[in-house]
Amino acid sequence: MPDKLKMFDRIRIERLVWTLDQRLYDLPRASRIAKRREVRANLLEAAADQGVRQALRRIGSSSALAREYLGAEFGDRPRHSWVAAAYFAALVPLLLNFALTEAANAYAQGLTGGHAADGTHVWSGISYLQSPLTFTIDQGRVDHTGGAWTPIVYVLWAVGTVACGRLWRLVPPFSRGLRTPAAEY
Amino acid sequence: MTTSHDPQLLKGVLSMVLLHLLAERESYGYEVAQRLQAAGFADVLEGTVYPALTRLEREGRLATRLVPSPSGPARKYYRLTPAGRDALAGARQAWSRHVAGVEAVLARPLPPPEEKEDN
């Protein structure tokens, strides 16, 4: 009976169920939840029957299982990944803004370290990535404005998101890929 | 029968076997896996069976319903749809043709093996 499983065994089952869930994020939400519940119910019964170790061995790794489920849902053709696209779209601005801010701070420290005179200084910024930055020095205090992304960064960001998520496969002519005829009964 | 099966051959016939088992009676995932094992397919793992059921469901060959279980979470029972019955009938015919063809080839007599020459 599943409720007789030890806490540690439940944790091992939940670990597989939730790692599988994470790998199925490209599925519609209802379908992903249904699979999570079905796998959990089957695993609990298998664990009560044969032991957790055997039940987990027979169901395999969460990555292999997810691959099979995604193949079952979308077919074996190459497919897009919303998760990969979302990771790229979210992480690139964070990393790029961090790098640009660090560069601006370094320039500001250079100005104060070099005892630059009060007034404004213009730095052209990192080529192709940002607009010029204007640094204002007032009694040793440095402020800056500017440094926005250039249009090319927005274009690269969008292209990178599409490339990372292989989103062109959403377009029907590309989604068919190199599908081979199934020789399945 | 406990001998292992060729995974490539199994992959080709797994859908047909699953359809037949579910035509006999509706079952939930783990029960299907157990019935497969009892039928001699001990090396067909649950990790293969559950996605195969999902694939058949997506293709419209299986329908599902949730049934409360006295011993845990609700079970998802699979049963054949009319399309599934048609697919099973077609698969049986294709399988019979396939077996007949293979049997015909295998029934041909082979020439006696040549004896190795000692140099």
Image (tube, coloured by chain):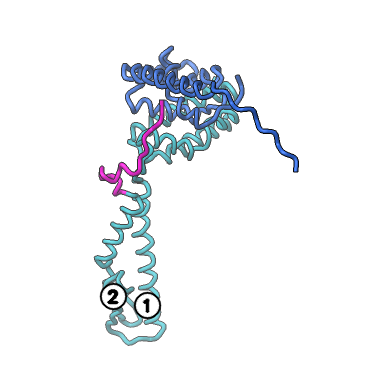
Q: Which chain is cyan?
A: A
Q: Is residue B114 magenta?
A: no
Outermost residue, left direction?
A151
Q: Is residue A180 magenta?
A: yes
Q: Residues within 10 Å of mark 2 (few under 14, many from 20)?
A: some
* Relative depth, front residue between A142 and A89: A89
Image: magenta residue range: A167-185
Mark number displayed over residue A148? none
Query: What residue sits 37% from the left and 46% below the top?
Result: A83
Q: Which residue is mark 2?
A: A133
Q: Where the C terminus of chain B falls, by quadrant?
A: top right
Q: Which chain is blue?
A: B
Query: What residue sits 29% from the left and 49% below the top?
Result: A168
B27, above or below A28, in the image: above
Kindly identify the amino acid type of the residue bearing the numbered disc 1. Answer: Tyr
Query: What residue sits 52% from the left and 22% below the top?
Result: A45
Describe the element under mark 2 as helix, strand or loop: strand
B69, above or below A74, in the image: above
Outermost residue, top direction?
B24
Judge from the rendering whether residue B3 lies leftward or rightward of residue B75; answer left or right: right
Q: Which residue is mark 1?
A: A107
Kindly identify the amino acid type of the residue bearing the numbered disc 2. Answer: Leu
